[in-house]
Image: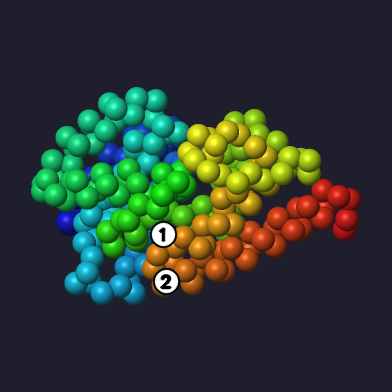
């Protein structure tokens, strides 16, 4: 796929993402694409399909109920759009398999086995959920939904299914329930290396946050 076609994909997605106020806007998408580029640089080019990777990275939140109200309509529109990019039926099916199964919530009960292309997109998306950016996005999303910052009496939950995950809790609990666990779910070596650094930043932040919450220096 040429750079011009990727620019077209970016423009197509921006019409939806530019209206987002949940932390899934075009800035998030651009970072995920950039992280895919970092990961791909260390992968065997014979084993991956950059066209599928970058397209999935751009469109992965277009059918997310956090971002769009009409998920079925968004799926139908995306399916039609992929045909205009001249993806084969198998390639379009792989893109949908990636974006349908890459999220944290879809892998709580059972981990879905993605293709290597999908693993790269999943890794990039999860890396953008952790570290300094992840901290900002967690509080941004929590504020959007009126979540508590922190309540020491409200303990982190053991998530067993997607419905439990969707129940709101404190922002600090979100680190324990999800964000601190993501580094263990990364697939590729480049992502694991980046993830370890970002995880350390989050843990340091949460430790300092709780110290200050308790009136310490």
Q: Position of residue 15 (x, y in %)?
A: 34, 34
Q: Is residue 208 left or right of residue 46?
A: right
- Residue at horizontal 47%, vertical 47%? 108
Q: Position of residue 170 (x, y in %)?
A: 67, 40
Distance Cα–Cα, label 1 vs label 2? 9 Å
Tag on residue 80? none
Label 2: state its secondary structure.
Answer: helix
Residue 146 lies, with reference to residue 201, above or below; the image says above
Residue 24 appearing in the image = yes
Q: Nearer the viewer, residue 156 or 146?
A: 156
Q: Is residue 144 left or right of residue 125?
A: right
Q: Name the residue tied to disc 1.
A: 123
- Residue at horizontal 64%, vertical 30%? 146
Residue 203 lies, with reference to residue 19, above or below; the image says below
- Residue at horizontal 35%, vertical 46%? 101
Q: Position of residue 212 (x, y in %)?
A: 82, 52
Residue 96 lies, with reference to residue 192, above or below; the image says above
């Amino acid at each position: 796929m040429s750079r011009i076609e990727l620019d077209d994909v970016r423009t197509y997605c921006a019409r939806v993402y530019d209206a987002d106020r949940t932390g899934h806007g075009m800035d998030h998408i651009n970072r995920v694409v950039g992280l895919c580029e970092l990961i791909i640089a260390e992968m065997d080019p014979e084993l991956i399909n950059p066209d599928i990777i970058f397209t999935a990275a751009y469109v992965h939140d277009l059918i997310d109920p956090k971002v769009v109200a009409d998920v079925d309509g968004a799926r139908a529109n995306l399916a039609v759009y992929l045909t205009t990019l001249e993806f084969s039926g198998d390639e379009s099916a792989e893109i949908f398999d990636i974006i349908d199964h890459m999220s944290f919530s879809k892998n709580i009960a059972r981990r879905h086995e993605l293709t290597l292309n999908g693993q790269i997109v999943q890794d990039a998306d999860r890396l953008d959920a952790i570290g300094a950016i992840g901290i900002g996005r967690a509080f941004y999303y929590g504020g959007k939904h009126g979540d508590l910052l922190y309540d020491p009496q409200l303990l982190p939950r053991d998530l067993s299914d997607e419905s439990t995950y969707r129940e709101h809790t404190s922002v600090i609990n979100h680190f324990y329930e999800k964000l601190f666990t993501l580094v263990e779910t990364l697939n590729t070596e480049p992502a694991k290396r980046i993830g370890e650094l970002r995880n350390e930043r989050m843990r340091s932040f949460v430790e300092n946050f709780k110290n200050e919450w308790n009136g310490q220096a």
